[in-house]
Amino acid sequence: MSQTRFAASHEWVRLDGDTATVGISDHAQNALGDVVFVELPEPGRAVEAGEAVAVVESVKAASDIYAPVAGTIAAANSGLVDDPGLVNRDPMGEGWFFTITPRDAADIGKLMDADAYAKHAEEGN
Amino acid sequence: MADTETLLETPLADLHRELGGRMVGFAGYAMPVQYPAGIIAEHQACRADAALFDVSHMGQAELRGEGAAAALERVTPAEVQALKPGRQRYGLLMTESGGIIDDFMVANLGDRLFLVLNASRKAVDLQTIGAALPAGVSLVPRPDRALLALQGPGAEAILAGLAEGVAAMSFMGVLETPVAGVPALVTRSGYTGEDGYEIGIPAESADAVARALLAVGAVPAGLGARDSLRLEAGLPLYGQDIDETTSPVEAALTFSLGKRRRMAWDFPGAERVREELDHGPKRLRVGILPDGRQPARAHTPIAIGGTTIGEVTSGGFGPSLNAPVAMGYVARDHAADGTALELMVRGRTIPARIASTPFVPHRYKRAAGATA
């Protein structure tokens, strides 16, 4: 399993073989507050980097989730439909949103590493 | 509210930060939207036990002098003159064209009236009321006062341990009594649908009183829980669900119109109110339950058969129902309970239905024999 990378819009992505798993960071779930609903993308959908592909709703507000890299959606985490609170409880693990087959796996390496992202989040982005 | 604007602070600002409150701008004040426990936990604490809210951003003012009640009736259709000492009532400030300037609470303290106003409207309210006063009646803003709301089924036991006489109060009762040794104005009221109290105290004592309440089990709760609680209770929020374009009849707030006032029609906007009572308003505020789990937020269009018939004015997730809840305005012909609706949420149609409010039953401690 490769290193976890982060997009400026607070998604994490982790490549494992041909597919990458995507979720939102601990910083993001904390900022959102209690998650009550998640809308997930359909497997097979082709998406561009930065395209809004999922929605996460907390008690207070709705936010878009963006594809961190271009590719094709492989699977969605149906566990979030019944238990959206997984996003808060385990954002980097069981609370994953979807998997994606990247068009070019090298795109993932261009995203921020954990240290750069921590700095990005700390700066209030 | 722009981040660049300087936000005012309440007397509990230090306590909020110490408790880990997430501060946001609201009506010009830095207020906690939630504490580390989160909105759902704070909401549940209020429904199950007791939650403490800082509502010191709200406007507080006294109306003094002979004829104060009659003077206030010049700007509201509420029955103020018959309000007994030791009682509080909900009322609306009205525009000449029948819109709502604000909703407020008025308490009769015997020698004066005490008003609680929405933070976002207090300047307009004070100007409106002040302009209507005859000689001999004076309006005295009390920005030197803080206000705490202790809400939930556990509120009585908590407050009774710190104040005399509060357990015997009934809903909308008013009592001047020390709380934790601090002279306080206590009303049995709130904005959550639960039993509870609002506690007015000198600003300099607010921190001590709040800490005394927290020390005996009150759970700190922020604006997020306050919003989800009032939404489940079916209570309108000024600026979202009511404003200067909505009338008391449209807003389903006719209970706040005094009987005598509805015979004399001697209040601002009476013409519109009378017309709408006689012939029905064009639209009505209703409760809405969306299917599924996705919340429908304010400004979501409401349709039937593809034709827009209204708009959501407040919507979110109701933790006690574990489901989304909303309220909004629909054309009167489509306002019956159970009416099937379509909500246009983020490009998709979500089925919903009109439902009676409150979504979660009120649990006020009404006096025996009291009806409203």
Image: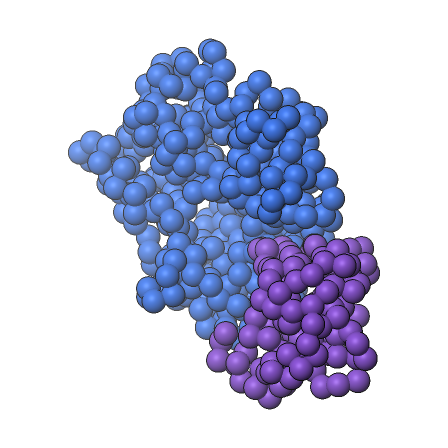
Chain colours: A purple, B blue
Q: Residue at x 57, y 63 (%)?
A: B34
Q: In this view of the protein, which residue sits in the foreground, B29 or A34?
A: A34
Seen as rendered, the residue at the extreme left is B135
Please state which of residues A89 and A15 is positioned toward the viewer in this rendering: A15
Relative to B108, residue A106 above or below: below
Quick one: B120 or A2, which is closer to the camera? A2
**Residue with the most extreme front position:** A103
Q: Does residue B286 appear left or right of residue B119 in this picture?
A: right
State the quadrant of the N terminus of chain B: bottom left
Point 55% across, 75% down: residue = A8
Q: Residue at x 30, y 43 (%)?
A: B124
| Residue A75 visible, this angle | yes
Q: Quadrant of residue B370?
A: top right
| Relative height, residue B213 to residue A121 (above, below) | above
| Furthest-bottom residue in this view | A115
From the top left corner, tell me how far across and down residue A92 is, in percent.
Answer: 73, 75
Tell me residue B355's x, y (percent): 67, 31
The quadrant of the picture occupied by the C terminus of chain B is top right
| The one of B178 and B341 positioned closer to us in this rendering | B341
x 69%, y 72%: residue:
A103
Residue B122 falls left or right of residue B21: left
User: Where is residue A15 drawn, in percent x and y?
Assistant: 75, 79
Q: Does any portion of residue B314 appear in the rendered image?
A: no
- State how many labels appear: 0
Residue B341 in picture, x, y percent from top left: 65, 30
